[in-house]
Image: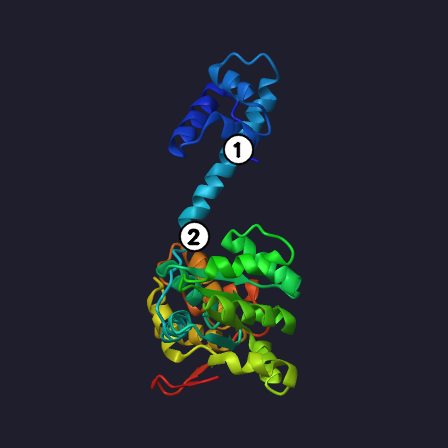
Amino acid sequence: MTQIMNDHARLRDAVRDRKDRDQLSLTQIASACGVSGPVISSFLGGNYAGDNEKVAGKLQLWLEAQETKERNRSERPVVPGFIMTETARTIMNLIETAQYDVDLAVISGNAGTGKTMAAEEYQKRTNNVFLITADPSLSSPSAVLLEIAETLGCNDKGQRRIRSIIRRLKGTEAVLIIDEAQHLSVKAVEEIRSIHDQAKVGVVFMGNAPLNAKFDGLGRTADYAQLFSRIGLRRKINKPRQKDMCAILAGWDGVQGEEVQLYAKEIGRREGGLRSMSKVLRNATKIARVNKRDQITRKDLECAWSEHMTGEFPKIRMKGGSGDVQS
């Protein structure tokens, strides 16, 4: 720790300056220091009757923490927002069709292909889009109905819950998107199918690869043939497209070199897809900024990979300067 300022007057000036620069209240500073607001106020006013050295020590630590946060903010890379890739456009078109044609859609694929981001962007751009993310706790019909009801603001309980959901959705031209739908039980999916039928709204099930197998299995069972036959739209996305990766790389500052782009694309082809690629790029950019560089290097990518990913860093080999790559 930096030696505590012996000159309390200088410390007071530094605290006031930081308070004004960061637009903080005394209450916020006091909370961060673990003391009361009146104690900070009295110390800054020069009339605190308690242990001034103790308060000064806490304020010095707070100042150092604020400086660290400011430095981290300056080094933090600007991560591109949503980028309309070809895959994102495909997913959004499918959701739009399900919404306005009142259809059931299944969008499945490996993690990191941009399914969730596309759905979230569609929700931002379109009215009456209700997005729910499932998890193992929502596998049962009652749990998923409660989640849908809370999302829609329906307060009825028990058997009346599904009726209130249907009343809320009927006539709205809405679409209900269930992300991570591989966690749902077949009975939970059947309840959502019932909402689709009775409320006349679109439904989109999105999830990882097991989702596709689950719905394929329904087609071979007599009990759920009605559910399977309702699915009018299907899309399986196995991995990011080359054009998707190019579009995302174009949105990153500091990713201009051909070698860096080739390695970044190879990362995008691995498990985790675009999500892994963006995570490694974000941390590689931070490493470059710490070292006062605008452009990231292959070494930055390797360091970022070793800190945040598992497995061996991808290996590629340029062929005689032609730009072809061997993995």
Q: Is residue 218 left or right of residue 235?
A: right
Residue 303: percent from the left, percent from the top? 51, 64
Q: Quadrant of residue 93?
A: bottom left
User: Quick one: SS at disc 1?
Assistant: helix
Q: Is residue 143 left or right of residue 272?
A: right
**Mark 1 / mark 2, whichever is N-terminal:** 1
User: Quick one: SS at disc 2?
Assistant: loop
Closer to the camera in the image, 89 or 282: 89
Q: Residue 258 bears which disc, if any?
A: none
Q: Residue drawn at (40%, 32%), measured in percent from left and top?
A: 23
Q: Quadrant of residue 15?
A: top left
Closer to the camera in the image, 275 or 266: 275
* Residue type indicated by callout 1: Trp
Residue 109: percent from the left, percent from the top? 52, 77
Q: Residue drawn at (34%, 71%), measured in percent from left and top?
A: 247
User: Badge 2 is on which residue?
Assistant: 76
Q: Residue drawn at (64%, 71%), measured in percent from left and top?
A: 187
User: Badge 1 is on which residue?
Assistant: 62
Closer to the camera in the image, 4 or 244: 244
Evaluate whether residue 258 shows in this view: yes
Residue 232: percent from the left, percent from the top? 46, 80
Q: Residue drawn at (41%, 61%), measured in percent from left and top?
A: 172
Above or below, 119 against 11 in this view is below
Dot 1 crowding, Cα within 10 Å, few <14, some 14–19, many 20+: some
Q: Quadrant of residue 98?
A: bottom left
* Residue type indicated by callout 2: Arg
Residue 33: percent from the left, percent from the top? 57, 30
Above or below, 7 against 210 in this view is above
Above or below, 315 against 195 in this view is below
Marks 1/2: CA distance? 21 Å
Closer to the camera in the image, 121 or 305: 121
Dot 2 crowding, Cα within 10 Å, few <14, some 14–19, many 20+: some
